[in-house]
Image: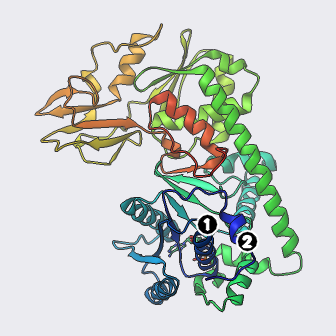
Amino acid sequence: MLDTEPDLSKSLFLHIDFTSGAVAAVSGGSDSTALLLLLKHHLDRSAPATKLLAVTIDHGLRPGSAAEAQAVARLCATHAIAHRILTWSGPKPSTGLPAAAREARYRLLAEAAQAEGLGLILTGHTADDQAETVLMRQVRNDRLARKEGLARDEARGHADTAGRGLAGMAPATLYDWRSWILRPLLGMRRAALRDVLRRQDVDWADDPTNVDETFERPRLRAALTDRGGVQRVDNALALAAQEGSARRQLGLAAADLIRRFAIQPAAGLIRLDPGLLNAGEDRAAVYALRILLATTGGIAFLPDQARSEALFARLKTGFLCATLSRTVVDCRRAGIFLRREARGLPPAAAVTQGTLWDGRRRITLNNSSGALLIAPFGAAAKRPAIGEGETPPSLMRAALAAEPALWQAGECVGLPGDIRAPAVVEARPVVAPFARFLPSFDLAPARAVAGLIGAATVPPLPFSGHSAG
Ligand SMILES: Nc1ncnc2c1ncn2[C@@H]1O[C@H](COP(=O)(O)OP(=O)(O)OP(=O)(O)O)[C@@H](O)[C@H]1O
């Protein structure tokens, strides 16, 4: 058993609800090794019946990776912790390898959690990782500001577009709308974790790419070891905390606006009350608009901040019809309507379990689909849809035309969920920008949009005693 500071493991994990067990993501590096041993120590003392599974992903990218995974296996055996090694097989891209490896890693971790019925995934990201992330984003923002002659705040807005905000990593992120990834060590410095391991005579692996200064992160890490490094790290952590809290506040305000001003009068059609334009909360209204645009268009990223602001400003000046994020924004007397544009809809395809149709609908196959195809309702959308209030029928038809429909032998057999359609297929709406990764900062707007479009509800945060993001 790990003989550690009496309260360290308790303070790190006490607020987490481990009722449904946990996967610990352990690379064999110092941080995740410390995470594993501190967690085991905590669970042994407070909830020994908790199911804990350590998972190591062997990306197969370095000659030593298999041996490192075996070393984690041995450590786990010593501490009576269940362990599994999962291998990233299949072709590796020649560009964007780190991002692809990260994507594969989270997919494999989530599959392992799902297969074992474990509700949580814990990673060993530390305060150092957080500071490095924020500083790298700041450098990119500054570069962008110089290139485009923008003020720092404006550049920050641009960076937020790609989810690269200065809030850094969220303490909790919902993966695939089903597994919570928690980062309980975000407040801990790497040096302190290494001290814990050294005191226990526990060794760890040093990934050579972590010191390869041809990469940006190792270069920055090296720069932070000089005299001013401590202060820069502290400043970056303070900035992350401040930005994280600002982002949560913005999300709460956007969620409130969505509840007050948005309705869905027909499938695939959102109506915004023009009161949104004069609610006196432009920043939150633009954020709400960006989330709704990405959701309607089935895009994983929010549209550009500057273009969204320009669109919002134009909406204030009168009627218009514009397209952003694959979404047609139609401002009329009857309201502001959002719908998926007709261009670039997916071609007809066989219905397959679990696929994401057009980035907007999660397909569930309750039975064998026979010879069913899924394709946009398109020209078959002649019958007027039943909507709420005074929604122009032409808009409902246009929205319906971009909705998925089921086809058999060249005939449309209805929309999934429609009484005429075979009951074997469901096509549940998803909140596109958060469908893969939902940082806890954005929990409030994600919940509001899920309620609006009929997406599955967000699983509760696995923290005991409170539900704040
Ligand atoms: N190969 C892997 N297998 C399992 N989990 C991993 C793997 N690589 C990274 N992780 C998880 O993601 C976290 C952050 O990844 P990062 O690449 O910063 O870690 P690392 O430098 O490889 O190792 P460590 O964080 O343990 O020092 C790790 O702490 C760990 O929880």
Q: Is residue 315 above or below residue 324?
A: above
Residue drawn where x is 72% and y is 64% of the image: 11
Residue drawn where x is 52% and y is 56% of the image: 19
Residue 302, position as x, y percentages in the image:
57, 42
- Can residue 280 be seen here? The reply is yes
Q: Is residue 106 left or right of residue 29?
A: left
**Outermost residue, bottom direction?**
201
What amino acid is labelled 1 in the image?
A: Ser
Q: Is residue 168 left or right of residue 181?
A: right
Residue 152, position as x, y percentages in the image:
80, 50
Report ligand 1 position as a quadrant: bottom right
The answer to which quarter of the image holds residue 310 is top right
Q: Is residue 278 or residue 174 the one in the foreground?
A: 174
Q: Is residue 59 or residue 170 the one in the foreground?
A: 170
Q: Nearer the viewer, mark 2 or mark 1?
A: 1
User: Label 2 vs label 1: CA separation?
Assistant: 13 Å
Residue 26, position as x, y percentages in the image:
53, 75
**In the rendered view of the protein, which quadrant contains the N terminus?**
bottom right
Of helix, strand and loop, which one carries label 1?
helix
Q: Is residue 376 above or below residue 67?
A: above
- Tag on residue 8? 2
